Image (tube, rainbow, N blue to C red):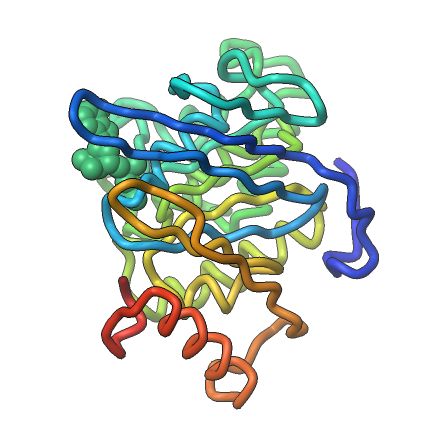
């Protein structure tokens, strides 16, 4: 696993994901229209915007789960032609197998899910430790809280040690305290792994808490409205003037009400 300092300033500014003029329509709906931006290697990029602005469509296209009608998406300079072990995806609704234990769900993320060789066992053990699920290896999803389920989802996505982690509103269904804890854990994991992260959310506070850079999208059709570089060290103090200023700027850009959710 590649280690990095977790600081954007110490990372190379090499482009890891390049999104060029991407468009996607569903019948009469234009979900994405001419979307272009790039994500640097090791960068934590949040995509924020109102419901329906195409965030999930964009993430699925980067994952290779959906094909744009126009434009291109490059990962490490190569066009995306389908899913790959270089990109791990974490879904909002966990998407765990109810009939598999924690260990079984995480194991499913490995490129050889049926293999019980010592290396694969050790990798599953390492992931259980990484996401703090020690003692719950043999529990089933129905026995877990929402936060624990999402830890399993994250561990499964991390299993093949992907270079890119794609996260679709992963903490939308957990309570605020659990979300705060998961934010800290995710930042720790990111610091340890040096992965490139694209994290979709409609919560401006969450975006400013996590991101090196926030891409703001507009809706109907889905377009990139602006991007903000967040020049704050982690952990970020939500009541600091700088933090509040970033949130206000993004909220102004979105023209949304003052609840910080769009
Ligand atoms: P977001 O994640 O920002 O809420 P989505 O990417 O889910 O946005 O959706 C963007 C637009 O595309 C929405 O208008 C949505 O209704 C439409 N859409 C998404 N997926 C489909 C689909 N499979 N069939 C038809 N319309 C879709």
Q: Nearer the viewer, residue 114 or 9?
A: 9
The answer to which image quadrant residue 73 occupies is top right
Query: How far across and down, in percent of the image, does residue 176 sit?
Result: 31, 68
Identify the residue at image location x=37%, y=74%. 252
Residue 88 in the figure: left or right of residue 225: right
Q: Where does residue 20 sit, x and y in percent of width and height?
A: 56, 31
Q: Using the image as rendered, state which of residue 123 and residue 252 is in the foreground.
A: 252
> Residue 180 versus residue 69: which sits nearer the camera?
69
In the image, is residue 216 above or below residue 222? below
Residue at the (56%, 60%) spot, across then down: 211
Of the 4 image quadrants, the one containing the N terminus is top right
Quarter where residue 257 is shown: bottom left
For residue 53, above or below residue 237: above
User: Does residue 242 show up?
Assistant: yes
- Residue that appears at 34% across and 52% down: 218
Position of residue 33 in the picture relative to residue 212 (left or right): left
User: In the image, 160: left or right of 174?
Assistant: right
Q: Residue at x 63, y 20 (%)?
A: 120
């Amino acid at each position: 696993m590649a280690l990095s300092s977790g600081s954007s300033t110490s990372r190379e500014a090499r482009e890891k994901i390049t999104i060029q003029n991407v468009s996607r329509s569903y019948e009469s709906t234009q979900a994405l229209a001419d979307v272009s931006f790039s994500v640097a290697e090791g960068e934590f990029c949040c995509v924020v915007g109102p419901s329906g602005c195409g965030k999930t469509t964009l993430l699925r296209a980067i994952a290779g789960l959906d094909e744009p009608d126009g434009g291109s998406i490059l990962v490490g300079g190569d066009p995306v032609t389908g899913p790959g072990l270089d990109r791990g995806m974490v879904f909002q609704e966990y998407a765990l197998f109810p009939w598999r234990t924690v260990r079984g769900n995480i194991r499913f993320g490995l490129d050889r899910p049926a293999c019980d060789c010592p290396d694969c066992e050790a990798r599953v053990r390492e992931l259980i430790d990484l996401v703090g699920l020690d003692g719950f290896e043999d529990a089933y999803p129905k026995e877990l809280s929402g936060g624990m389920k999402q830890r399993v989802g994250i561990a499964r996505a991390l299993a093949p040690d992907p270079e890119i982690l794609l996260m679709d509103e992963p903490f939308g269904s957990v309570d605020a305290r659990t979300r705060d804890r998961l934010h800290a854990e995710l930042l720790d994991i990111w610091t340890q792994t040096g992965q490139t992260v694209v994290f979709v959310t409609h919560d401006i506070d969450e975006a400013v808490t996590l991101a090196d850079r926030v891409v703001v999208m507009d809706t109907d059709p889905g377009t990139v409205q602006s991007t903000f570089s967040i020049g704050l060290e982690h952990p970020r103090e939500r009541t600091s003037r700088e933090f509040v200023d970033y949130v206000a700027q993004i909220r102004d850009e979105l023209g949304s009400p003052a609840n910080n959710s769009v």
